Image (cartoon, rainbow, N blue to C red):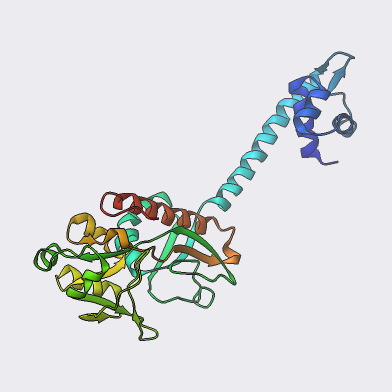
Amino acid sequence: MDRLQAMRIYSRVARLGSFAGASVDLDLSRATVSESVAALERHLGVRLLARTTRRVTLTSEGADYLERCQRILAEVDAAEAAVRGARDRPQGPLRIDVPTAFGRYLLVPALPQFMKRYPELELDLRFNDRVVDLVAERVDLAVRVGAVKPQRFVARRIATTRRVIVGSPAYLAAAGRPTRPEDLASHRLLGMINGGTGRRIDWSFRGRRVPALRYAATFNLAEAQVSAALAGAGLAQTIDLLAGEYIARGRLETVLDEFVSEGPPISVVYPVAARGSVKVKVFADFAEGLLLRWRESLAGSTQPAR
C-alpha cells in the first residue's frame, strides 16, 4: 500500500464526506477510492469512517488521524515545492556569446535589471562577431545575427532587422539628400567587405535593381563603418541594430527609407541538451524583450519592419 497516496485519498473523502465526490475530484474510480480507505483501516486496525447509505462521517479515531494526515501531507507538499523551486530557479554559471553591437548597445545597459531579477546566476559574457562552436567552447546560449542552420542546436528567431542608409546631418546638409538609389552615384559611399572572404558586400534595395556603386572607403568592421558615417565621411548602409541609437539621438539621419530592404534575422541558439534549461530560457526571453523594446523605440525614427 502507498501510504501517502492512501492518506491523500482518505483526507479527500473525509473533507468531502463522500466516496463518489472524492473519486471525481481525484479522477479515480470509486472502487479504487473505497479500497484504498479500507486498506488504510486494515493497516491501522481501526475504523476511520462511519458509512451509511447517505453519508460518510468521521469516527473519533478518524478525526484525530485526519488532523495528523493533513499536517504530514502539508509537510510533504512543502518539501516537494522547495525542491522543485530550487530546480526551477535560474542559478549557477551561464556562458553567453553575443554580437558586439547587441552586447554594447542593448545588453550592457540592461544588465543591472537582469542581474537583480536573477541574483543566483553567474554570467560569463562573451562579445564576439564570429560564429563560435557552442559545444567546443562550452557556450550555453548565443545571440546570432544572420541565417542559422541548426544541426545539433535549437534556433529561436527573436527579431528581424532592417537595412538603413544613414549619414550625419552635417554630411547631408553639404551633399544633399538622395531621393532615389540612382542619386547615390554623386555621394561618398562607405562600404563593407566580408572579413572572411575579402569580398565587397553590395548594398541592397527593396523593389529596385541595385545600381552600380562606387565606394569611397570600405571597412571590414561594421562599427567602424558606422563611426565613419558619424564623422561625416559619407553614407553607409548598415542594419538598424547598429545605427538605431544614433538615429534616435539625431546624430545620424536615414535616407531612401522607402527603398530599404529587410536585414538579417536575430536568433538565440543553444545546444539541444539545454532545451529544458530554465536559465537558458530566462535569458532567451530577456534578449527577446530587449529587442522588442528596441524595435518599438525605433518606430518614431525609422520605418517599421516589413
Q: Is residue 236 left or right of residue 37?
A: left
Of 162 and 33, the residue lying toward us: 162
Would you say 271 lies left or right of 245 here?
A: right
Snapshot quadrant of residue 161? bottom left
* 183 or 77, nearer to the observer: 183
Residue 204 pos. (x, y %): 35, 70
Residue at left offset 41%, top offset 59%: 160
Residue in the picture at 65% in, 39% down: 77
Q: Where does residue 237 sit, x and y in percent of width and height?
A: 28, 69
- Please give the name of the residue rendered at 23% of the width and 65% of the height, measured from the top-left corner: 166
- Placement of the C terminus among the 4 image quadrants: bottom left
Q: Is residue 13 above or below residue 281?
A: above
Image coordinates for residue 150, horizontal then vertical, percent: 56, 70
Quarter where residue 7 is shown: top right
Query: Which residue extends farthest bottom?
Result: 198
Q: Which of the two residues, 96 or 221, is positioned nearer the viewer here?
A: 221
